[in-house]
Image (cartoon, rainbow, N blue to C red):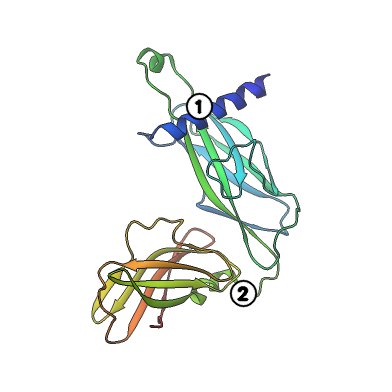
Amino acid sequence: MKRMARLALVACALVFMSLLTPLAHASVIVHGTRVVYPVEQQELIVRLENKGDRPALVQVWLDAGDRQSTPATARTPFTLSPPIFRIEPNQQQAVRLRYTGEPVPTDRESLYWLNVLEVPPSTQDAAQKNQIQLSFRTRLRVFLRPQALPLPAERAPAQVQWKLVPHGQGYALQATNPTPYHVSLASIDLASDGRRYSKAANQTATDSLLMPHGDTKLFALPGLKAQPKGAAQVEFTAVSDFGARVRYSASPTF
């Protein structure tokens, strides 16, 4: 009964999250910005920490890309332990992530998402003031990496192919990822004719993720209205396995 009550609480929290825009910040943080899971590894530890001054009830699960997923609907080749737990203020919790061995592509990485749902405890003071206790969900990328891929992961961003193409009233950079890895692009600039043109600011991190084996995306350059007359250089940063932003440069084709 107690477990069912907790699941009901989490389900209600997900409904509220779809209706409300949080005005505060989550207290529970995840150590790291991504998880890289080699298939040959028995398990990985993901560490969470409660930076707040109150206990927090947390539920974790993985999904295959559906932001509307719940623990009941998500299907992935992973198990998490524990799936539900309480973190006291200024304390940490280790979550064990284990690959179940279900068949996945062996020629490329597979992408999943780790969901961390924080449900703050209700307080008598909040109830008296008719305040809504908001829940927070954090999603992190989980890359399941096969063995013996033909290229080291750190070399993948340098293999991205760039092309300058007409786009609307101006130009855009077209990026193609020929590698078996996901390439997470952070910043993208084109340096040409003594000027620098940056990609549109409204493109999100998801827009800037290049999937393996041929994924292509366009990055508009709002300030570039004519094809460069001289040499051009693409200067970009990509996110490494450890969350660091690494700088790269490449010569685009026209």
Image depth: mark 2 or mark 1 in front:
2
Q: Which mark is residue 151?
A: 2
For residue 30, say whether it is visible. no
**Relative to 19, does residue 207 appear above or below in the rendering?**
below
For residue 111, say whether it is visible. yes
Give how far across and how far down residue 241 sits, in percent: 54, 61
Q: Residue at x 58, y 69 (%)?
A: 153
Using residue 21 as the reference point, say whether residue 209 is left or right of it: right
Q: Residue at x 59, y 70 (%)?
A: 213
Q: Residue at x 43, y 25 (%)?
A: 133
Q: What residue does disc 1 label?
A: 55
In which quarter of the view is residue 246 placed? bottom left
* Mark 2 Cα shell of 10 Å, populated few (<14), some (14-19), many (≥20): few
Instruction: Tell me which label, 2 or 1, sits earlier in the chain.
Output: 1
In which quarter of the view is residue 152 placed? bottom right
Q: Secondary structure at mark 2?
A: loop
